[in-house]
């Protein structure tokens, strides 16, 4: 089946992460279900650009966000490029598809005073669990790594002599990140108490950490110090980048920390900095 062949290609040749492959799988399953239910089609070769447009309209009418719709369009574009290359289809209907425009939203981040409160005054649980939870939040905030990168960290990825972490990012691309003496001490204390063998972070039952658990614990601790709408691990990534930029870090350096391929993905954080500068200007300048 073309779909299975494509997903195998993403997993084994493109080396996409399990989360990315799952997203592609979900998008394609929804598309196949739509063409079957609405047009009684099962063969991808019979799909036209008009049919794809009707799927897009159906999703928008159902209240699916423009960002999600565009991600599904991206999935189909990749799928049809693969099908064309494999000779499964002769024409690419996606060439006639234009994605709906999205309104750009500024990244949500936690104020520095709130992060200071969380790391300096909030009580974490006693023992290994509390040390793990605090280290997770400190790592996300201090390095800007992704959730998937965090849960896949191994003890062997830490180099205490050089003060660096080896991160396996999207597309299995490695990058080396420095860490502070404070973070170094936290890691050592955690390792001394928990003694993990392979994976750095473990569940209470000694198994490899999973994404939902990290999301729940980050959410619960952020609730103690902030009222922002989103309280997720990714918000700590936004917070890292915004605080770095506000304190004078070079945009290209932040790009390397975050593991972004292009600078355009990092530039979104400049909007938050400009907003802050505007507020300071209005408050401080006599003619503002």
Image: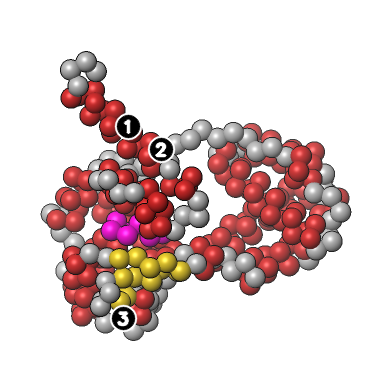
Q: Are marks 1 and 2 in contact (CB under 8 Å)?
A: yes
Q: Is residue 275 above or below residue 177?
A: above
Cα–Cα gap, marks 3 and 1 = 43 Å
Q: Which residues are magenta?
A: 140-146
Asked whether residue 240 appears in the rendered view, the answer is yes
The crowd level at tag 2 (other Cα within 10 Å; few <14, some 14-19, many 20+) is few
Numbered disc in front, either 1 or 2:
1
Please give the residue where the numbered disc 2 appears in the rendered image: 106
In space, the residues marked 3 and 2 are separated at their CA atoms by: 38 Å
Q: Which is nearer the eye, 3 or 272?
A: 272
Tell me where residue 287 appears, x and y as whole percent. 22, 15
Q: Residue at x 59, y 69 (%)?
A: 15
Image position, residue 260 (x, y; %): 46, 55
User: On the rendered structure, is 17 left or right of 119?
Assistant: right
Q: Which mark is residue 275?
A: 1
**Residue topped by disc 3:** 196
Question: Who comes first in sequence, dot 1 or dot 2?
Answer: 2
């Amino acid at each position: 089946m073309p779909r299975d062949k494509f997903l195998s290609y993403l997993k084994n040749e493109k080396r996409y992460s399990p989360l990315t492959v799952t997203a592609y799988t979900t998008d394609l399953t929804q598309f196949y279900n739509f063409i079957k239910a609405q047009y009684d089609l099962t063969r991808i070769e019979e799909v036209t650009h008009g049919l794809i447009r009707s799927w897009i309209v159906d999703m928008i009418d159902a209240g699916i966000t423009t960002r999600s719709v565009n991600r599904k369009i991206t999935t189909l574009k990749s799928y049809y490029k693969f099908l064309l290359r494999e000779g499964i289809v002769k024409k690419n209907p996606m060439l006639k598809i234009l994605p709906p425009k999205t309104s750009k939203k500024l990244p949500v981040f936690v104020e520095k005073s709130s992060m200071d409160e969380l790391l300096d005054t909030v009580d974490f649980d006693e023992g290994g669990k509390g040390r793990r939870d605090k280290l997770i939040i400190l790592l996300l905030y201090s390095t800007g790594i992704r959730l998937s990168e965090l849960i896949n960290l191994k003890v062997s990825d830490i180099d205490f002599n050089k003060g660096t972490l080896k991160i396996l990012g999207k597309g299995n691309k490695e990058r080396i990140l420095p860490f502070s003496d404070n973070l170094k001490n936290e890691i050592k204390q955690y390792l001394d108490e928990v003694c993990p063998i392979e994976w750095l972070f473990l569940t209470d039952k000694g198994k490899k950490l999973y994404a939902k658990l990290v999301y729940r614990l980050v959410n619960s601790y952020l609730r103690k110090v902030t009222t922002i709408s989103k309280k997720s691990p990714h918000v700590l990534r936004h917070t890292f980048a915004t605080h770095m930029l506000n304190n004078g870090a070079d945009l290209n350096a932040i790009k390397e920390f975050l593991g972004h391929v292009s600078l355009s993905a990092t530039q979104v954080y400049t909007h938050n900095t400009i907003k802050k500068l505007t507020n300071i200007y209005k408050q401080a300048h006599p003619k503002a």
